[in-house]
């Protein structure tokens, strides 16, 4: 129990102070809005005022009571044509009896077209029947030529031979490869001999870098329990290994050639 609660005065219950709320907000226009709503309530229950007086329910629409205005179309019998060019031609027999046949240019063209069509039909090769097979008892038919079940391409002369465009493509690839190898042989990167003083200076710089990284590696904490510590340790180990390889390469080889652009 808290020390401040051990006092006698805390045993006497304190009267609760009533919470006095502020008065509710009342708008000045409340009564006017209520009166306007009551006066206009239900005045427009439909979709606006009715512009046309509606029929009573007893006078509903019945069959054959509505008048339908259809467009007037004059027939050929009632039509009195004054132009002779609009008249229909008579049948071929009556037309031949009434008017003698004259060999005009149009008639000649029409006769030539008819004759040509007749000759084309006579000379046309009849279509051969398709090779069909019925595979079910219900009458399902398969056309072997369309389904790819008939050996069409085996009987061709160039069957199994490599197409000419593929041979051409292979030849172009080989030519491009030969040209690339010739270009690489012709344009060789020039090499430069690394002098002894420059080699010693480079070796000295690598050793100083290795010493600094080794010192930094030794200063790492013994316990690597977090991810940043582990990453730092692996990065330093990788850099030290790369430097050791470079130092070993320079110490083992006395004469070293490097590219001119390096």
Image (cartoon, grey):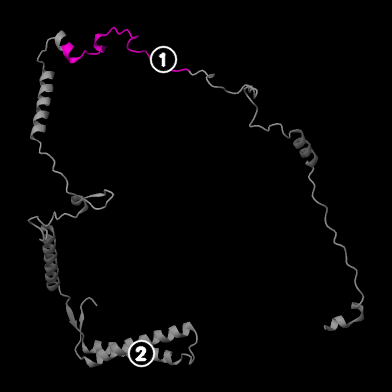
Residue 53 location, quadrant = top right
Residue 57 appears at what percent x and percent y? 64, 25
Residue 205 appears at what percent x and percent y? 32, 88
Magenta stretch, main secondary structure class:
loop
Tell me the residue at 9%/24% (across/down): 112
> Going from the N terminus, do you reach mark 1 or mark 2 first?
1
Residue 77 among those drawn in magenta: yes
Residue 240 vertical placement versus 262 (above, below): below
Residue 81 vertical placement versus 71 (above, below): above
Tell me the quarter of the image containing the C terminus.
bottom left
Tell me the residue at 12%/29% (across/down): 117
Residue 128 location, quadrant = top left
Highlighted magenta segment, given as a residue range: 69-95
Q: Which residue is mark 1?
A: 72
Residue 48 among those drawn in magenta: no
Secondary structure under the numbered disc 1 in the rendered image: loop
Secondary structure under the numbered disc 2 in the rendered image: helix
**In the image: residue 70, left or right of residue 129:** right
Tell me the quarter of the image containing the N terminus.
bottom right
Residue 80 appears at what percent x and percent y? 32, 7
Q: Residues within 10 Å of mark 2 (few under 14, many from 20)?
A: some
Spatial CA distance of label 1 from label 2 is 110 Å
Q: Which dot marks residue 210?
A: 2
Depth check, front residue: 34 or 133: 133
**In the image: residue 258, left or right of residue 235:** left
Depth check, front residue: 72 or 122: 122
């Amino acid at each position: 129990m808290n020390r401040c609660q051990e006092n006698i005065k805390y045993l006497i219950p304190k009267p609760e102070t009533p919470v006095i709320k502020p008065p509710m907000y009342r708008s000045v226009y409340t009564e006017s809005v209520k009166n306007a709503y009551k006066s206009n309530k239900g005045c427009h229950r439909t979709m606006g005022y009715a512009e046309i007086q509606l029929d009573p329910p007893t006078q509903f629409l019945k069959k054959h009571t509505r008048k339908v205005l259809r467009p007037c179309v004059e027939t050929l019998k009632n039509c009195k044509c004054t132009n002779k060019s609009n008249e229909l031609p008579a049948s071929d027999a009556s037309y031949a009896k009434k008017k003698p046949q004259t060999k005009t240019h149009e008639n000649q063209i029409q006769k030539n077209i008819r004759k040509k069509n007749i000759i084309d039909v006579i000379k046309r090769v009849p279509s051969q029947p398709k090779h069909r097979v019925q595979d079910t008892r219900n009458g399902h038919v398969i056309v072997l030529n369309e389904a790819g079940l008939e050996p069409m391409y085996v009987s061709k002369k160039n069957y199994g031979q490599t197409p000419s465009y593929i041979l051409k493509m292979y030849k172009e690839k080989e030519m491009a490869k030969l040209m690339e190898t010739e270009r690489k042989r012709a344009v060789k990167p020039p090499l430069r001999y690394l002098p002894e003083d420059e080699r010693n200076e480079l070796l000295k710089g690598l050793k100083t870098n290795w010493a600094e990284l080794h010192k930094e590696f030794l200063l790492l904490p013994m316990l690597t329990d977090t991810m940043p510590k582990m990453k730092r340790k692996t990065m330093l180990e990788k850099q030290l290994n790369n430097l050791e390889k470079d130092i070993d390469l320079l110490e083992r080889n006395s004469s070293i050639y490097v590219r001119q652009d390096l």
